[in-house]
Image: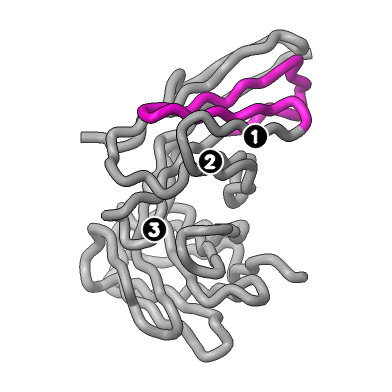
């Protein structure tokens, strides 16, 4: 049973077309939910950490939100350079300090 | 402030061989974790070291082993390589407590 599920698996947008990526989790005792961006062949690049339901964080065209069961990464007016795979990960009480990742959402933004 | 650096960037090995991957942690970080990322998948936790002691391990066989040194750099060793070990191996360091994981660019291992 997956503990972290991301949807959709792939998303194609036109430049300027806003959308949202979803990350749902089933772990209990959440200590932190992380969003990373990953370019092909590279390591994940940190975007946000969210710690409690209701928390929101923003960075440029990205906004992350958190509820008790899921997180959303909202992308407003995306540009082609936003194309990447976006990974969600959780750190929880039973994870011994490590991160449990979802499989990611591959975002393509066409000009 | 330097980030997390991994070496080598790419590696090709033959099935049955042994490999050592290296990681230099970000300055001030005393915790290092290793992850395996197969193509099209999210990273999978291998193990974690804190102050030179292993303090967490994922569902990987004993032929995956590691070390952390006093300067908090780390090694991942894999013995008896199998074709399925082909993946991107990522190192992540943090100051501990589940905060501030910083990833390196990874080592792409191909087993033939």
| Secondary element type, mark 3 | loop
| Secondary element type, mark 2 | strand
Q: Which residue is mark 3?
A: A98
Residues drawn in magenta? A60-85
- Marks 2/1: CA distance? 8 Å
Check if mark 2's residue and mark 1's residue have beta carbons within 8 Å.
yes
Residue A46 in the magenta stretch? The answer is no
Task: Kindly indicate the quadrant of the structure image that contains residue B95.
Answer: bottom right
Disc 2 crowd, CA 10 A, few/some/many (<14, 14-19, 20+): many
- Marks 3/2: CA distance? 16 Å
Q: In this view of the protein, can residue B38 be seen by the observer?
A: no
Disc 3 crowd, CA 10 A, few/some/many (<14, 14-19, 20+): many
Looking at the image, is mark 3 or mark 1 earlier in the sequence? 1
Q: Residue A57 — which label?
A: 1
| Secondary element type, mark 1 | strand
Q: Which residue is mark 2?
A: A50
């Amino acid at each position: 049973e997956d503990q972290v599920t991301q949807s959709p698996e792939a998303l194609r947008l036109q430049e300027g077309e806003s959308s949202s990526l979803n990350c749902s989790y089933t772990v209990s005792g959440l200590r932190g939910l992380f969003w990373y961006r990953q370019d092909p062949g590279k390591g994940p690049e940190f975007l946000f950490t969210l710690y409690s339901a209701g928390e929101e964080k923003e960075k440029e065209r990205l906004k992350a939100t958190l509820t008790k069961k899921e997180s959303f990464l909202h992308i407003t007016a995306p540009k082609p350079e936003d194309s990447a795979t976006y990974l969600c990960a959780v750190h929880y009480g039973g994870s011994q300090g490590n991160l449990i990742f979802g499989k990611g959402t591959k975002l393509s933004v066409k000009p | 402030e330097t980030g997390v650096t991994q070496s080598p960037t790419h590696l090709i090995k033959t099935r049955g061989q042994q490999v050592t991957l290296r990681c230099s942690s970000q300055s001030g970080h005393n915790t290092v974790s290793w992850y395996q990322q197969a193509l099209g998948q999210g990273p999978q936790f291998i193990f974690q070291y804190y102050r030179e002691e292993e303090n967490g391990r994922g569902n990987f066989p004993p032929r995956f082993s590691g070390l952390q040194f006093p300067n908090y750099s780390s090694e991942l060793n894999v013995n008896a390589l199998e074709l399925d070990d082909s993946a991107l191996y990522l190192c992540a360091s943090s100051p501990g407590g589940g905060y501030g994981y910083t990833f390196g660019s990874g080592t792409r291992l191909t087993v033939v």
